Image (cartoon, grey):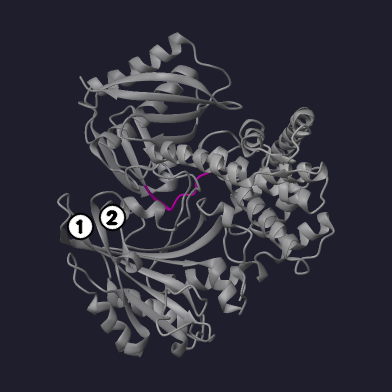
Amino acid sequence: MTADELRSKYIEFFKSKGHVEISGKSLVPENDPTVLFTTAGMHPLVPYLMGETHPAGQRLTDYQKCIRTGDIDEVGDSSHLTFFEMLGNWSLGDYFKKEAIFFSFEFLTGKDYLGIPPDKISVTVFAGDSSVPRDDESAGIWHSLGIPEERIHFLPRSDNWWGPAGETGPCGPDTEMFIDTGIPACGDSCRPGCHCGKYIEIWNDVFMQYNKLKDGTYEKLSRKCVDTGMGIERTVAMLNGKKSVYDTDIFRPVIAAVESVSGKKYGQNEDNDISIRIICDHVRAATFIIGDPKSVVPSNVGAGYVLRRLIRRAVRHGRKLGIEGEFLSKISEVVVRQYAVPYPEVAGKADFIYAELKAEEAKFLQTLKKGEAEFEKMLPNLLKNPRKVIPGRLAFKLYDTYGFPIELTEELASENGFTVDREEFNEAFKKHQELSRVGGDQIFKGGLADHSEQTTAYHTATHLLHQALSMVLGSHVAQKGSNITAERLRFDFTHPQAMTKEEIARVEQIVNEQIKADLPVTMEVMPLEKAKKLGARALFGEKYENMVKVYSIGNFSKEVCGGPHVEHTGGMGVFKIQKEQSSSAGVRRIRAVLIKE
């Protein structure tokens, strides 16, 4: 089964069960400061899982592009990916455990769907603890479908529990489905969740039935939700009997492109294979990040830094394969063609993607030249060292100051009869990572989709700001990105030059006038076409459902948005722009706060 076939079968199956297909969302989360990228299929649905009404109804299904960056250094083995696709279906206060498990079992085992023999399926359910009882209900449903007790495993919270997203909120047990690969068990304690390779997880159903309170106790929710997820790449590999996701139709054309530019054949040398897999994954991820409706471009902060790291790591491994000069755009062309149908927004930005890849690749090649020149400067002093060992701190300086990879330092060292003190380098690098993580934790605190009173006020303020910018600067102003925390808002918008002090003051004045006017904030669900006719703003390039939520702030602003918003603008505070600066070519960035009176 190909990825396209799996994607199609899944969506059609759930549509036949009364689910509405909704559009997958951007890789850059809207108004969510907790993550740099959309990390799971459920991520864009969090507001609706937490109580908001979805305009498409209570039964939903989609496929969603995702990025996870925590394992970048692991990419290169047979399974880790930076970019991946998730299939999902949701019940928002409609059906619950019985239907969800029945649907999962039918899709997994049905001859018209995945056709997996039931005797190959094992499941896990929540074992219970002092706070929440054991999930005997899910276990009983699986048993009624013919899964024997010996293949129903009760596992602890660390394995079979989701949430809450923050300190408090909706959460609950989950049930995970595993396929037995048929290889012998690694021991008496081997069971689903073991990493020996006997069991491969294929699906996960999350049952949000509890609300965690501030005192750490749990109360049952009156509105229960189901969130499920299946990874396309892993499932396709498993269905086709492949040990690696890179051995599937998903990666075959991309690997062929790398083989073409490098002259190296995949499957003949493990070191080469690692480099080929890294290039395939990183170029695929970079293509989707740049080609997103909310395009990210390489930079030294946030999502742009992750993108830069992916591109530069791909370039470095290209050099290891003997590739000279620029090559990433050639690989990207294959990715764009491959995903033109399920993700037309990427094909629509093809030229932009290739241009950004070429520019960053050229910049990094210059960085490498600088690093090599700095190494040459260090060499006379290094030659005085009889031990022929380059201190790790010098190697780290090349890395930290010039972006020069440690592996290339080791190559240059070896050519001159030196080794590098890797232990000292690793210590310096680890310290650098810890400092970065401390800063990063400030970005990620708060949990997914923080809907506190203050972030809700900031969300509403972005609508006021957007309209005010259009009034002061002109109709060309369009939102390019938004990031909100409980302390401030950040808003990116199209504008060719820096704002003047007078323009900034005028925007502040307009926003504060609307706050003082205590305008009502109303929401109406309507067809997208009607929203457009009414002049409602919608983020350019974003995918929307046929039915959308339109928020109106008095007669001042009208915008397609998922929420949340205040009910009246009065009491939001005094709006103050702290900084206006360049974000990228033709895009400005505003940071602003609401000061309580």
Q: Amino acid at mark 1?
A: Asn
Residue 536, can we see it?
no
In the picture, which quadrant includes the N terminus? bottom right
Mark 1 lies on residue: 211
Residue 81, can we see it?
yes
Q: Nearer the viewer, residue 276 or 434?
A: 434
Instruction: Tell whether position 546 is magenta.
Output: yes
Residue at image coords 45%, 17%: 472
- Region rendered in magenta: 540-548
Q: Nearer the viewer, residue 479 or 116?
A: 116
Mark 2 lies on residue: 164
In the picture, which quadrant includes the C terminus? top left
Q: Amino acid at mark 2?
A: Pro
Q: Say if 75 sits above or below 241 in the image.
A: above
Instruction: Tell whether position 400 is magenta.
Output: no
Crowding near pointer 2: few (<14 within 10 Å), some, many (20+)?
some
Q: Say if 446 sits above or below 398 in the image.
A: below
